[in-house]
Structure formats: C-alpha cells, structure tokens
Amino acid sequence: MATVKANDLRGAVQTLKAHFKSGAPKNMRAAFAEDPKRFSRYSLSLDDLLLDWSKCLVNDETLSLLADLAKIAHVEARRDAMFAGEPINNTEGRAVLHVALRNRSNKPVKVDGVDVMPGVNDVLKRMGAYADGLRSGAIKGSKNKPITDVVNIGIGGSDLGPAMATLALSPYHDGPKTHFVSNVDGAHIADTLKDLDPATTLIIIASKTFTTIETMTNARAARKWIADALGEKAVGQHFAAVSTALDKVDAFGIPADRIFGFWDWVGGRYSIWSAIGLPLMIAIGPENFGRFLDGAHAMDEHFRKAALSRNLPMMLGLVGYWHRAISGYTSRAVIPYDQRLARLPAYLQQLDMESNGKGVTVDGKPVSGPTGPVVWGEPGTNGQHAFFQLLHQGTDTIPLEFIVAAKGHEPHLDNQHEMLLANCLAQSEALMKGRTLEEAKAQLTAKNLPKSEVNRIAPHRVFKGNRPSITIVYDKLDPYALGRLIALYEHRVFVEAQLFGINAFDQWGVELGKELATELLPIVSGEAKPKDKDASTQGLVAHLRKRRGK
Ligand code: F6P
C-alpha cells in the first residue's frame, strides 16, 4: 500500500493553516452576500439525501487544499484497501469489513483468500428465520406462550446500535417489544425486568467477546431471573446469543440454533449490520432490516465510486477535519431535528470518539496535531431550550450538524413537522448571521425604549454569528434512509482518521480502566487491602466502605 510521506503531509497541513489565516472566508454573511450560488456550490446530494456545508467558513480554495491533503494521505487508496479486505486495522492485524455485512451485490469479498459472503448470508438467513418465528409466535417460550418482550443485554457497540436504530425506526416496529440493558448498575436490569413476564420474555446476550464484565454480570442476573421463575430447564428457550466467541456462548448453556455468530473483522461500533442487529430485526422484521442494509450499501457504493469532490462522506470528512485540525474547534454538536434519532448522538459518540480519540499515528508515533473532536448532542428543538444559549453567545465556537427529514411519519401532525423544519432552519441561519450591535439597537429602538435603555440592553442581544453548521436532509426516516445515514457517518470517521494518520479501528484506550476495575473489585468488597493505591483512591474506598456499613 502507498505510504504517506510525512513531509508532504506536514507541508499540506501547513498550507491549510496558512490558508485559514488568510484566504479562507472570515465572514459568512459576506460570503453569502458575495456569492448567490454558495448553496449549490457547497452542497451535494445522493438521491434524496442532501448534505449542505455552505454555512461553513470554506471556499473553493479551502476544498481544493483539503482535497490535496486527502490525496497525500492516500484516503482513496486506503478506502479501497478497506473494501478489499486488507488488514488495515494494523494493531490487531485484522481486516475491517462491516461493509461486507451489507454487501447487497453479493460480489465476493475475500479475507486471506476466502470469500466471507457465504458466511454473512448464512447468518442473515438464520437471523431472518429466527426473527420470523418469534414475530409470528411460532417460536414460543417454555410455557408455550409467544414471546412478547425481547431484552438485549450488551454494552457499547453491542447495545448502542440496535438501541438507537430500534427507536429511530419505531414506525416500523411491529414485532415484540424490545428493551436494552447495558449498565452494570443493577438498577438498569432491575427496572427493565420488573414489569416483564419471564414466560414471555427472550433474553439476547450480545457480546463480541463474550467476556465484557457488564454484559456477563447482567446475563447471569437475567439467567437467574428466568431459572427462578421457570426452572433451570427453561433457560435454553428463553435465551439467544450473538457473539464471535462461540465456545464461550456454548459454555453459558445456549443451544446452538440460538447462537448467531459474527467475525473478528467486524468492529464492535460497526456491528449493527451483523447479528448484533438481531433485536432490530425482531422488532421491524427481516424485510425492513434488509432495507436498512440496502441503504448502507448504497452509501458504500457511492463512497467507493464517486469522485472525491462529489463524494458525501469525503466532503463531510474533509469539512470535519477543517473544523477540528485547522480551525481548532474541539467539539461538534450533532442535533437531530428528529425525535426518533434521540440516541444518535450517543451512538455517534462511540463511533467517532472510540475510533478517532487516539494519540499515536498508525506507526505508533505521537500525532503532530489534534485528532477526533468531542461529539455530543440532543434532539432539536429540545436542545434549543437547554444549551443553545452557549452555542449562540458563548465564547467557544462549536460547529453543529443538523439532521432533519423533509417529511414526518405523522401526516395528521404535518403542521408540527413544519414547525420543526422552521426551527431547524432558524437555528442554522441565526448561528450563521448573528445580530450586530446596530441591529440590536435598531430592534430595541423600534420598541420605543429610551436611548439609555437601548444602550444598556443592546450588548446582551448581540449574536456574533459566523458559527458554522452543516445540514443533512433526507425525505423520511425509513430503514433505507437510516442505513444510509449511519454509513455516511461511518465513512466520515474513516476519512478523518486517514487525515489524522491514525488507526480508527482499535480501542486500546478502554483497556486500562477495565484492568483497574478488576483490580478494585476485591478492594471495594473488602477482600483485599488498597495498600498499593494512591491516597485519593484509598480515601474514597475507605469512605465508601464506611458509608456502606462494611
Ligand atoms: O468499550 C470497549 C468495547 O470493547 C467496545 O469497543 C465494544 O463495543 C464494547 O466494549 C462491548 O464489547 P463486547 O461486544 O465484546 O461485549
């Protein structure tokens, strides 16, 4: 594979930094006033999916310099290597092939010379048959009652994807109710199970490794709940599992026909397309799940084939890099004006921050500039009444990503959808335009306020504006649109990772905390002494043990 020349890369970054200082637009209002074609120049579509970055401080030269950087960083070559099944996750020696899970063309995808597609199709088929059986009531619980509730026990990528997507696609949810338990806090599983009937509940244990402490602890609690209510023999009929560690699942006592496998070339945060999507498939049915995969595949094909300047994930990645690495913005807010995407920000937090929150390059050298930003957000309009004050008038600039459907699912509430749209557009307009002191004074004067009052209040009503935002619009939040949207974000994270020069597909940063938690458990429970711990940890342990009466 082509190697990135550090000097060329450094040079391109320096050129971009110089361009940021002089060359890039400084004032968005002026940029729009000067160029009536700014929207068409800085937006792209793929069918009904529109990406608009015209409200960002970029011009043709910015994009051309970013494209130069992408060439030097071999973004397209690395993309092709990913699709070709090369082991681009170099610290774990693995291919990265979530795209194979939604490869609807069914063209062979080889890992070490072996086509993975027959295995992918086989699991999908088994998932479909199992989901259909549950949905129709043909597959029953131990008391011969149909399954009414499915509880998915998993965490991180084994939870956030199906939880986010099941909520997003609630208009298509016609199967059993689904519940998601992730936290090791016993409150989570207790609150979830308390209203459920064990006789009509299926528990899915979802864990790539089948070792994650939170998941295995909750799985044991759920197993006891089933066994206590229905007897030990009933466990097999009330559990299913999704994992790459088939031997460990077997040891847990789950029958082979209820085990759905996947592969080490599927990263946890990229696994919604695999058997990890089982609860989603049970909720919306195999056909709709297939549409979800179709949407992602359409984005994959676009990402693979469209020229860089016409390529949505490339442009989203380039502008994201511009904001983070060149403009120096440390976070980005993702604001879906779509209540059903309420869990999308949390999902994207793992996708983006676990992928690109790295401090060393692919070669293990310290990175020379910033890497992934903090990703956060809440649905609009709720966010407007909570944190938008800071986004409009606070001292930090935080780029926003607005996500909105042209049409809602509730025709009888279309007036509310119009209000939602108006709010979404109003926010990006306000962030872009702002309000000058003169405008604030003129408004107050028009209200007949005395001049002294106008002068006193006006500074508080000034909005600096010039705050960048990207808007993403699709027709309707259906399975296809959701699949395409998630794949867009996955590939954007990939593009940014190549520009940062990091491996987006490992996650060593979660290890240390896990190791220390294992070490601390016997200390917290009093079986071991905290003698080697720092004073703060020792003090906290002592306080907690005292308060717990131990
Ligand atoms: O938090 C680290 C992590 O490994 C994530 O990458 C992963 O999605 C999550 O834990 C759950 O892992 P598993 O599916 O193996 O239980």
Image: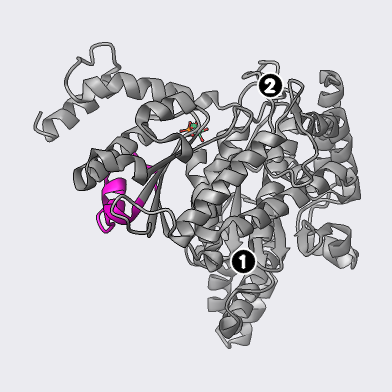
Give me the disc on residue 389.
Answer: none
Is 417 or 233 nearer to us in this picture?
233
Q: Nearer the viewer's eye, disc 1 or disc 2?
A: 2
Left or right, 187 with respect to 40, comes to left
Relative vertical location of residue 547 with respect to residue 348 in this rendering, above or below: above
Residue 400: give x, y in percent of width and height. 64, 55
Residue 51: give x, y in percent of width and height. 77, 58
Residue 155: give x, y in percent of width and height. 44, 39
The three-letter amino acid code for the residue at tag 1 is: Val
The three-letter amino acid code for the residue at tag 2 is: Thr
Residue 187 is covered by the magenta coloring: yes
Q: Secondary structure at mark 1?
A: loop
Residue at the farthest left position: 549
Residue stretch in magenta: 180-201
Q: Quadrant of the N terminus?
A: top right
Q: Which residue does the image show at 12% across and 30% down from the upper left?
A: 546
Residue at the farthest bottom position: 448
Relative vertical location of residue 186 with respect to residue 198 in this rendering, above or below: above
- Is disc 1 in contact with disc 2, using a CB cutoff of under 8 Å? no
Earlier in the chain: of badge 1 and badge 2, it is 2
Residue 19: give x, y in percent of width and height. 85, 40
Q: Is residue 373 visible?
A: no
The residue pinned by badge 1 equals 462
Q: Quadrant of the C terminus?
A: top left
Give me the disc on residue 361.
Answer: 2
Q: Which residue does the image show at 58% across and 87% down from the upper left?
A: 447
Q: In the figure, residue 504 lies in which quadrant?
A: top right
**Mark 1 crowd level (few <14, some 14–19, many ≥20, 10 Å Cα):** some
Cα–Cα span, label 1 and label 2: 42 Å
Q: Which residue does the image show at 74% across and 48% down from the upper left?
A: 297
